[in-house]
Amino acid sequence: RCGMAGEPGYRCLRGDRCRTDYQARISGPLLDRIDLRIEVPAVSASDLIRPDRAEKSAAVALRVARARRIQRERFERL
């Protein structure tokens, strides 16, 4: 079971059987408790290596202050 079925540029030799076997690793009772399922593409090695554009601390502080102000206004109405 490779778990790579459906990934672009990858062709599993076992085909759909591989995908079924891989997904069968999660028990049925556990799957019954999961309401939302989404497919997430694999992350490439180059995405992990390259530096990401970081947000400035000042921008984060402004966003947090705005969120706190909005929350404070909500509670003042109560």
Image: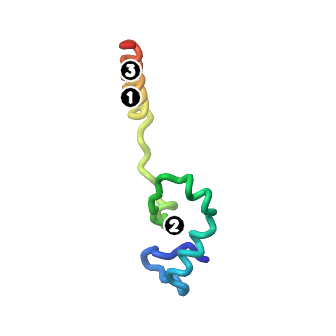
First in sequence: mark 2 vs mark 3: 2
Using the image, tell me which numbered label, if any, was put on residue 23: none
Residue 45 tag number: 2
Which residue is at the front of the view, 39 or 41?
39
6 vs 2, left or right, is left
Q: Are marks 2 and 1 in contact (CB under 8 Å)?
A: no
Disc 1 secondary structure class: helix
How far is the residue under mark 1 from the one under mark 3? 11 Å
Residue type indicated by callout 3: Arg
Q: What is the secondary structure assignment of the residue under circle 3?
A: helix
Gap in Å between the C-alphas at discs 2 and 1?
33 Å
Mark 2 vs mark 3: give the one in front: 3
Q: Is residue 37 above or below residue 7?
A: above
Quadrant of image for the C terminus: top left
Frontmost residue, 30 versus 9: 30
Residue pictured at 61% horizontal, 77% vertical? 1
* Residue at 36% across, 23% down: 70
- How many C-alpha atoms fall within 10 Å of the one at disc 1: few (<14), some, or many (≥20)? few
| Disc 3 crowd, CA 10 A, few/some/many (<14, 14-19, 20+) | few
Residue named by callout 3: 69
78, 64: nearer the viewer: 78
Closer to the chain start, of discs 2 and 1, is 2
Look at the numbered disc 2 and give the secondary structure of its residue.
Answer: helix
Q: Which residue is mark 1?
A: 62
Circle 2 Cα neighbour tier, 10 Å, few/some/many (<14 / 14–19 / ≥20): few
Question: What residue type is disc 2 on?
Answer: Ala
